[in-house]
Amino acid sequence: MADFWVRGMAVDKDGGAWVVRSSSFMPHVGGRVDYVSPDKKTVTTWTGHELLGTASLTGTASLTGTQEIRDVAVDKDGGLWFGTSGAGVFYCKAIGTVDHVYSAATGAWGEDTPMDNIFVLKFVGGTLFVGSAGGVAWADFYLPQTFMFSNKNAAFAIAYAAVAALLFASIVRFVN
């Protein structure tokens, strides 16, 4: 893991850890995603392109070139949410499948392409918060709603700080 830096982490309901890593040494693989088993004895690694690169729900839903996975969140049902550098948010019910892509191309936030440049994902209850270059979006996936978003820079800065604090609290609970 020495040549990659950690971008994001999430812990699933079984106690396994999902770790997203990036590297300037290998820019065309989409980053790396590691799964550390709940017993901490096994680590499985995928590239971002292995996980998302062949997804083709709308014809535009795949990682290309130097795009990579930047963050991961796990919902209460074990679904994986991957935030990317330019391709939006990918939802996978299981490894090997992409069930939905939320991006400007799929109409998730209109034509606001900076929203596709994701920096942080965080679940608070059933609400997923997405921090991006275009602002903050959120949606409650356990109610029939669409993404709401704000591209106000002040709102982004406040929400990003709050989400980062929540992420840190989650990591501290995992380590302890």
Image: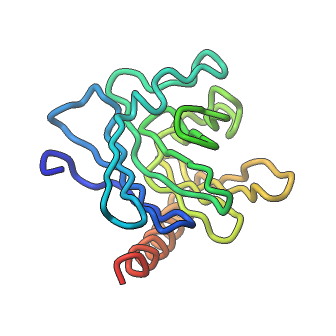
| Front residue of 156 and 108 | 108
**Residue 109, position as x, y percentages in the image:** 68, 40
**Residue 91, position as x, y percentages in the image:** 61, 42
Question: Residue 176 sits in which quadrant?
Answer: bottom left
Residue found at the very far right of the displayed protein: 144
The relative height of residue 21 versus residue 62 in the rendered view (above or below) is below
Q: At 38% from the left edge and 31% from the top edge, which residue is drawn?
A: 67
Q: At 57% from the left edge and 66% from the top edge, which residue is drawn?
A: 13
Question: Residue 85 sits in which quadrant?
Answer: top left
Locate residue 100 relative to residue 15 in the image: left or right. Answer: right
Q: At 72% from the left edge and 55% from the top edge, which residue is drawn?
A: 139
Q: At 39% from the left edge and 46% from the top edge, which residue is drawn?
A: 70
| Front residue of 167 and 109 | 167
Locate residue 89 relative to residue 15 in the image: left or right. Answer: right
Q: How many numbered circles are shown?
A: 0
**Residue 84, position as x, y percentages in the image:** 45, 40
**Residue 113, position as x, y percentages in the image:** 55, 33
The relative height of residue 48 versus residue 171 in the rendered view (above or below) is above
Q: Colour mode?
A: rainbow
| Front residue of 43 and 63 | 43
The relative height of residue 87 versus residue 118 in the rendered view (above or below) is above
Locate residue 25 relative to residue 47 in the image: left or right. Answer: left
Residue found at the very far top of the displayed protein: 59
